[in-house]
Image: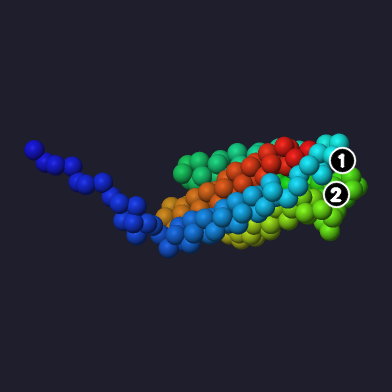
Amino acid sequence: MRQAPPPKTWFQKIEKLHPYETLLYLGMLGSGIIFLFLSLAFLSSGREYLQGLNEQMPLAFLVSTFLLVLSGYTSVKMRIHYQEENSAKLHRSLKATFVLGILFTVFQVLGWMELANKGINFTGVPSGSFLYVLSGIHVAHLLGAMTFAVILLLQLRKIEQDMVRKLVWMTNPYEKLRIRLFTVYWQFMDAVWLILFLLFVLSF
């Protein structure tokens, strides 16, 4: 009876990853560590000051959270449409994800303005400063993904005019990898924000 091959070690699995996958996962690990330490610093920065203000979470942060969760759904649809080789729906899902990312960023800025109006300034107490720092670093990370989304949108717009190029692009394993890595990173940023948002909610 033929024996089953021994299970692969985690190192063997890493070796088989595409270099882009390895870079992305290492980047996500690094970002996760940064957010972890900043969150721990925020938790130990005297959050009772925020509670003492008897203020509520900025409404803009609530709206931005809903928008980012919705963008997570549209990013998942991107992978489905690519597997279906439906470039038109893929283009729409990618555009929706990008637009929702823009709106999320706008509402983050509005949230900072609400914080300032509540007397929570960037140069005030450490707990208030961390609200700006954490949300600002998250926006910066998301802007990187949105830049990549613009590149994909421009490529999709070009191939729509050429059926041969469209077929090649939609069946190219490299393009499939890029779509998958984009959605993985986007959903990672979704998860990071939901954790930060929960910390913010518990601080008010």
The location of residue 51, given as percent across then percent down, is 81, 39
Residue 47 appears at what percent x and percent y? 76, 44
201 w.r.t. 42: above or below: above
Mark carried by residue 99: none
| Percent of width and height locating residue 145 | 62, 56
Amino acid carrying mark 1 in the image? Leu
Q: How many marks?
A: 2
Q: Secondary structure at mark 2?
A: loop
What residue appears at the point 51 percent right and 44 percent down from the top-left corner? 79
In the rendered image, is residue 195 in sight? Answer: yes
Q: Residues within 10 Å of mark 1 (few under 14, many from 20)?
A: few
Task: Identify residue for label 1.
Answer: 53
Query: Which residue shows up at 64% across the image and 57% down it?
Result: 141
| Residue under the point 69% across and 57% down | 137
Circle on res. 120 = 2
Q: Is residue 55 left or right of residue 166?
A: right
* Residue 143 placement, left or right of 178: right
- Position of 134 relative to 76 (above/below): below
Q: Are marks 1 and 2 in contact (CB under 8 Å)?
A: yes
Indicate the secondary structure of the residue bearing disc 1: loop
